[in-house]
Amino acid sequence: MVFLMDFKEIRKLKEIVLKQVKPSREELEKEERLVARLKKRIKGIEGKHVDVIVAGSIARNTQLKDDKDIDVFVLFPESLPREEFVKEGIRIAKECFKGHKWEEAYAEHPYIRADVKGFDVEIVPSYKIKNTKHLKSSVDRTPFHNAYLLKKLKEKQKDDVRVLKKFLKGIDLYGADLKTRGFSGYLCELLILYYGNFESLLMKASEWPESIVIDIEKHYKKTAPLFKHFNSSFIVIDPTDKERNVAAALAEEQLERFELASGLFLKKPDIDFFNPGKPGAFSLNDLKTEFKKRNLSGILLARPQGFEDTVWGQLYRFSGKLEQKLKELDFDVIRKAEYMDEKDIILLIELKELSLPEIKKRTGPKAEDKANVNAFIEANKKLIVSGPRIEEGRIVIEVKRKTSSVGKALKALLEEIKKENLRLVNEGLKEKQEILAEKELLNAARRKPGFRLFLTKYFKGKEAFF
């Protein structure tokens, strides 16, 4: 009852949003005609495939007006060997896309995507299996997702899925790709199915406990063991495959942002949650002013060749390793952020200090602990520049740091990280590698409008929904 008036306002906003995001009859018919042509074309190609289906939001009528994605799955018999299955899938896709510009992409296995009449069409090979216990590739679940949701989702709920997607887009949480680490379309559909509608989902989400299991088909009698089994505190069991957590790609921080945004929206419903507007970039003088308030450094490397999702995944690992190694050298990392465009990657690092004293104090065991005192001194004797001595009952020495400058530290750490198993990032480091101080970061902002906007958002540091 507390939210009664808010819910009335929310329903009004839903009507406004639906007018913005629901495709018109004309648009739907255009999509249907293209889908029919693609299916007919693939079925007419001689090969070992046994069926063709269209999946995703277009198949389930939950697509947004500005979404132009069509996912076509070419199904092959289970008996077909994996190598031949992939080879046949690629061949059929290329044949279908004759006359169109296509590219090979890669998820669990290769597939082909192309631009067809303004639509981003993906043709993906998949096995036709009896049930998800017979999975041979992760995409084999897709036909089961389709069938389940076509049976379960009501027409009004399909519109609520659209509203939820637009809400998530407005707060930068839509997409399960490795850059966003947010909500997939399938997860959106399941959440609306489970909670009934958009406003009920938000009300529950604003009050979710630290750990939750959503098991629509009640596959499990006990939920407590699932947190360890899936290594997650937020679990949405796939209704078609009880061994899969549909929310596995959702980062914990992104979940927390959704919970907070849900509560704020319920408290004060506003169309700005759906349409936040595009922020303007700071002038170069404004950026200079912001730089003077902080200790910033950066690393520039060439964007490696590879699929965007894979590159983002390795970039996050690279960024995490670098932060860990800086901390081991006593640099206090306040914040970091990653930027990528068509040519370059820039890792931005904000530190408490850009340089440290050359000498640092190291405290050892208690003075009366003779065995450990001797071991401590022996282990550090080549580094000692002052001491050992006793301070407050403990052995104290002073040693020279490996490096006191963050610039030198970053150069040394990059050489270390090159030995790690980050092939794509290492390829970028081989092609281009530069440590960026304030001057170089400003030059990059001058050359790259996208990076300038990235810096502006970083300095503002404000969530879209506040």
Image (tube, rainbow, N blue to C red):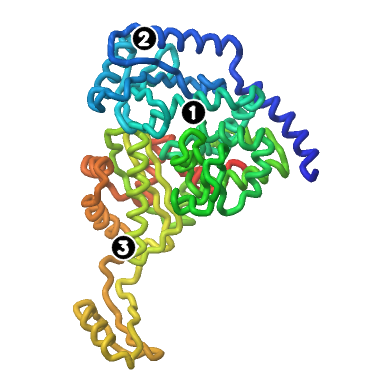
Q: How far apart are marks 3 and 1 (CA)?
A: 54 Å
Outermost residue, bottom side: 368
Residue 137 locus on image (x, y percent): 34, 31
Nearer to us in this view, 289 or 69: 69
Residue 466, can we see it?
Answer: no
Q: Depth check: give the residue in front, 4 or 280.
A: 4
Figure quadrant of residue 99: top left
- In this view, the mark in front (3 or 1): 1
| Cα distance in 3D space between marks 3 and 2 | 64 Å
Q: Residue at x 79, y 45 (%)?
A: 2
* Left/right of residue 265 with respect to residue 72 in the rendered view: right
Q: Quadrant of residue 428?
A: top left
Residue 280 is left or right of residue 163, and the answer is left
Q: Residue 43 carries which label?
A: 2
As rendered, which of 270 and 287 lies closer to the eye?
Answer: 270
Counting other residues with Cα less than 10 Å from the Cα at mark 2, is it few (<14), some (14-19), or many (20 or more)? some
Q: What residue type is labelled 1?
A: His
x and y percent of residue 393 in the render?
A: 38, 91
Kindly state the secondary structure of the residue where label 3 is placed. Answer: loop
For the residues labelled 2 and 1, say whether their Cβ atoms are less than 8 Å apart: no
Q: Is residue 466 left or right of residue 448?
A: right
Which residue shows up at 57% across the image and 43% down it? 214
Q: Which of marks 3 and 2 is nearer the N terminus?
A: 2
Q: Mark 3 points at which residue?
A: 405
Q: Give whichever of discs 3 and 1 has the lower sequence position.
A: 1
- Element under disc 2: helix
Residue 440 versus residue 104: which sits nearer the camera? 104
Marks 2 and 1 sit apart, C-alpha to C-alpha, by: 22 Å
Q: Residue 83 carries which label?
A: none
Q: x and y percent of residue 314 in the render?
A: 33, 44
Q: Which amino acid does label 2 sit on?
A: Lys
Residue contact at pointers 3 and 1, CB within 8 angstroms:
no
